[in-house]
Amino acid sequence: MRKLLCITAHPDDEAGAFGGALLLYHERGVQAYIVCMTAGTAARNRGTAQTHDDLAELRRAEFAASCRLLGVARGEVLDYPDSKLDRADLQQAVGDLVLRIRQIRPQIIITFGPDGGLTGHIDHAMAGTFATLAFEWAGRPDRYPEQLEQGLVPYRAQKLYYHSADFHLPDRQPISQPTVTARIEIGAARFEKKVQAFRQHTTQAPLFERVRKNLGQGGGAVEMYHLAAVSNPREAKLETDLYEDVVDD
Ligand SMILES: [Zn+2]
């Protein structure tokens, strides 16, 4: 069974940053899992929420609706504080992700790079940093050995990808992106469905027009990724399929 794990920072990242790949690989029979590290409660746009807990509840429900539309097998929202992932406990955050990798056993992990993925958000950068360490450490018996006492075994995913692009957002601070090594054709129909998934996040409605414009840069029909690490050493090459060279177990 092919499985893909997508590690994000906020509800709506799954749609805005990774929605095209999630849709495409779902159609190809891949089971997709999402671990989102925060409930997005620092958002400026709060919908009808009066309190922090209201907003967390609304955003978790919106995330679930988006996941349904994207064909995600299971989406999970963790409880790390929004906009403060740089202050999260590294040992704990990486351990939470290592645990999911050992449980889910995905061949591929997709996440943000340390640039913070297009917007440069600090939580994106940190989610990707934690995910990168988790990718490396999940396969080592000497990391988080206490997780191995209940029947879990070390697990090495085969490929780690960062979200990337060959353009900058004009209305943001410039960032230095990872090089594009994979161009995934998602096509116009999946682009529309990805925008629709983003629109499940109704608390974020004031962002819809701007996000659609940003997602549509370069036509919007291609999602770009950077192959950051592989379990089988090899030279870099330009890819059109994240599952290229993946060995089925
Ligand atoms: Zn985000």
Image (spheres, grey):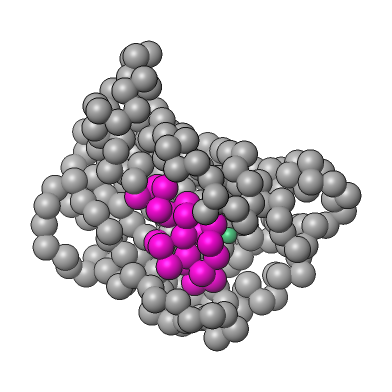
Indicate the position of residue 153 as horizontal and vertical percent values: 28, 23
Indicate the position of residue 59 as horizontal and vertical percent values: 71, 48
Judging depth in this view, the residue of 44 and 180 nearest the camera is 44
State yes or no: residue 200 in magenta.
no
Quarter-of-image position of residue 83? bottom right
Judging depth in this view, the residue of 101 and 202 nearest the camera is 101
Q: Is residue 146 above or below residue 232?
A: above
Indicate the position of residue 219 as horizontal and vertical percent values: 48, 80
Quarter-of-image position of residue 206? bottom right
Left-right relation of 181 to 245: right
- Which residue ends up furthest to the left in the rendered image? 234
Q: Is residue 79 visible?
A: yes
Please state the quadrant of the image where ligand 1 appears. bottom right
The structure residue drawn at horizontal position 18% and vertical position 42%, both measured from the top left corner, is 247
Left-right relation of 187 to 133: right
Q: Is residue 125 above or below residue 156?
A: below
The structure residue drawn at horizontal position 12% and vertical position 52%, both measured from the top left corner, is 233
Judging depth in this view, the residue of 184 and 95 nearest the camera is 95
The structure residue drawn at horizontal position 43% and vertical position 82%, both measured from the top left corner, is 167
Magenta highlight range: 113-132
Indicate the position of residue 54 as horizontal and vertical percent values: 82, 43
Quadrant position of the C terminus in the picture: top left
- Which residue ends up furthest to the bottom in the rendered image? 170
Number of numbered labels in the structure image: 0
Judging depth in this view, the residue of 151 and 91 nearest the camera is 91
- Which residue ends up furthest to the top in the rendered image? 150
Q: Is residue 32 visible?
A: no
